[in-house]
Amino acid sequence: MKYLSLVLCFVSQFTFSQSYLCVGEAGAGVENGGNVGIQALIYDVSKFRLRLTDEHHHDDDTVHQHDRWRLIENNDSSPIFENCESQYRCIQKEGFFGVFYMTKEHVFTYVIQKAYGADLSWRILYSIKGRCNLSTE
């Protein structure tokens, strides 16, 4: 019994992460910059992927555990959102505009503004909707 409680204590330090794979189904955007003026566009987002992962963290001096949801776009190494509020909501307020919402039915909305070009003057506001599934990876 003594060994069992020791093993359970050791195993409880390691928790499994939860992850969602989100696949784009419809996408549109508004771009401006360069010689194109302002125009609306429809995008093929069939290959667009987001991965929403939950990393459990333990505070070093306490026994408190908390979740840290991160959103990664198209298998990039750096997350778009480092500290989401929950698995249902991420908001970026500094540096660039972006939001991610997922309903309890796992339908997501992802809106983000990105800048391109040498002087970052070509800007596109993307809006993508699709579905998320619990991932086993």
Image: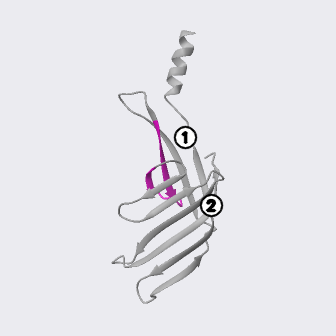
Magenta stretch mostly in which secondary structure?
A: strand
Residue 69 percent location from the top left of the image: 49, 47
Q: Amino acid at mark 2?
A: Val
Residue 61: x %, y % from top left: 35, 28
- The quadrant holding residue 98 is bottom left
**Residue at (54% x, 19% y) in the render:** 7
Q: Would you say 34 lies left or right of 133 here? A: left
Question: Camera-side residue: 82 or 2?
Answer: 82
Question: Does the magenta run of residues contain 79?
Answer: yes
Residue 54 image point, x, y percent: 52, 44
Q: CA distance from mark 1 to mark 2?
A: 20 Å
Look at the image and give the residue range highlighted in magenta: 66-84
Instruction: Looking at the image, tell me whether mark 1 or mark 2 is earlier in sequence order.
Output: 1
* 5 magenta-colored: no
Residue shown at 66%/53% (left/top)? 105
Locate residue 53, reporting x and y percent: 53, 48
Mark 2 highlights which residue?
A: 23
**Who's the residue at 48% across and 61% down the image?**
99
The image shows a total of numbered marks equal to 2
